[in-house]
Image (spheres, grey):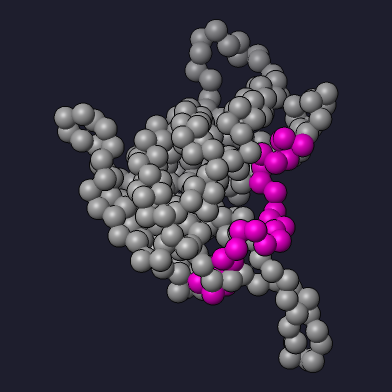
């Protein structure tokens, strides 16, 4: 519900730390696996013929975790990764598997979207409040306030709209259509429709796959033209490349990016598979 969200980013905030916050707080003198706790990042199988078959998988895991730490730290604290667990790893694996049926793909994508949306809402601040329970007891809790909206970048971003509505039933959602110009191959805005008072709102920008980052950069520029400050934008995505995330942060240092994985190979087939146009 839109009234369940917070309108003031300056209010007290106690959001659950994302994966990269654990990484940044790790002691550099400790082994890489200690820096990331029990989490492991899904990596692609190494097909290089120079790797011996007797290579220790644990060493591969350590190198992978080192890559995660290096990538996240290079991009900066604006990039937040969901804490990785086996549930998220399985969803990522099914989405990337070319043999996955469309039904299973959509089911797993919706689950992963819901996790990202929930954590996106968790990044918003809240105020403390006290309520009375049915038994007459006082309970100290929290509440979110009005002043938020969603914006999906068409078409793949529309896949995330239902996940946001499942969490916030009355939230308003705008849309942006951006496509590559046939002559220049540059991203071009073809359509944009937002709530009239979007300049007063915090924006959850939805785009599942960050590849080059160009589409998101153009979308943020349109939001800025409508009065939205980059610091009030939280970009929700499922997968990102290091180049895509870095390009966005370099262009808009105040933006927040929330994703489940940063890897050079992004599942760019997501939109076609989700909507059945592959």
- Identify whether 19 is placed above or below 76: below
Q: Main secondary structure of the magenta part?
A: loop
- Quadrant of the image occupied by residue 51: top right
Residue 10 shows in this picture = yes
Residue drawn at (73%, 91%) of the image? 134
Q: In the image, is residue 29 part of the stretch drawn in magenta?
A: no
Q: In the image, is residue 17 part of the stretch drawn in magenta?
A: yes
- Identify whether 278 is placed above or below 192: above
Residue drawn at (71%, 35%) of the image? 23
Which percent across, then down, holds residue 179? 25, 42
Residue drawn at (51%, 59%) of the image? 202
Which percent across, then down, holds residue 75? 58, 31
Residue 89 shows in this picture = no
Depth order, front residue of 147/107: 147
* Horizontal arrangement in the rendering, residue 80 relative to residue 197 (left or right): right
Q: Which residues are magenta?
A: 2-25
Number of numbered labels in the structure image = 0
Depth order, front residue of 74/91: 74
Residue drawn at (41%, 36%) of the image? 213
* Horizontal arrangement in the rendering, residue 238 relative to residue 73 (left or right): left
- Quadrant of the image occupied by residue 149: bottom left
* Horizontal arrangement in the rendering, residue 175 relative to residue 69 (left or right): left
Depth order, front residue of 274/116: 116
- Quarter containing the C terminus: top left
Q: Check the image and name the residue furthest to the top.
A: 50
Which percent across, then down, holds residue 152? 38, 55
């Amino acid at each position: 519900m839109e009234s369940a969200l917070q309108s003031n980013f300056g209010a007290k905030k106690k959001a659950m730390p994302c994966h990269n916050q654990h990484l940044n707080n790790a002691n550099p003198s400790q082994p890489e696996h200690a820096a990331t706790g029990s989490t492991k990042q899904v990596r692609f199988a190494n097909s290089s013929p120079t790797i011996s078959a007797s290579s220790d998988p644990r060493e591969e895991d350590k190198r992978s975790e080192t890559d995660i730490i290096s990538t996240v730290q290079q991009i900066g604290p604006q990039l937040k990764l969901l804490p990785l667990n086996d549930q998220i790893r399985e969803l990522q694996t099914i989405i990337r598997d070319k043999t996955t049926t469309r039904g299973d793909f959509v089911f797993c994508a919706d689950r992963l979207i819901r996790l990202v949306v929930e954590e996106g809402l968790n990044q918003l601040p809240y105020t403390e409040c006290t309520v009375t329970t049915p038994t007459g007891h006082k309970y100290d809790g929290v509440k979110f306030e009005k002043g938020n909206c969603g914006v999906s970048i068409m078409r793949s971003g529309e896949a995330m709209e239902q996940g946001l509505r499942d969490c916030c039933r009355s939230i308003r959602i705008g849309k942006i259509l951006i496509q590559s110009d046939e002559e220049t191959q540059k991203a071009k805005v073809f359509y944009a429709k937002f709530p009239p008072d979007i300049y007063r709102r915090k924006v959850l920008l939805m785009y599942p796959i960050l590849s080059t980052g160009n589409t998101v950069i153009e979308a943020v520029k349109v939001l800025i033209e409508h009065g939205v400050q980059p610091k009030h934008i939280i970009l929700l995505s499922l997968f990102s490349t290091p180049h895509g995330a870095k390009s966005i942060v370099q262009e808009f240092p105040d933006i927040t990016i929330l994703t489940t994985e940063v890897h050079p190979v992004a599942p760019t087939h997501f939109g076609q598979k989700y909507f059945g146009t592959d």
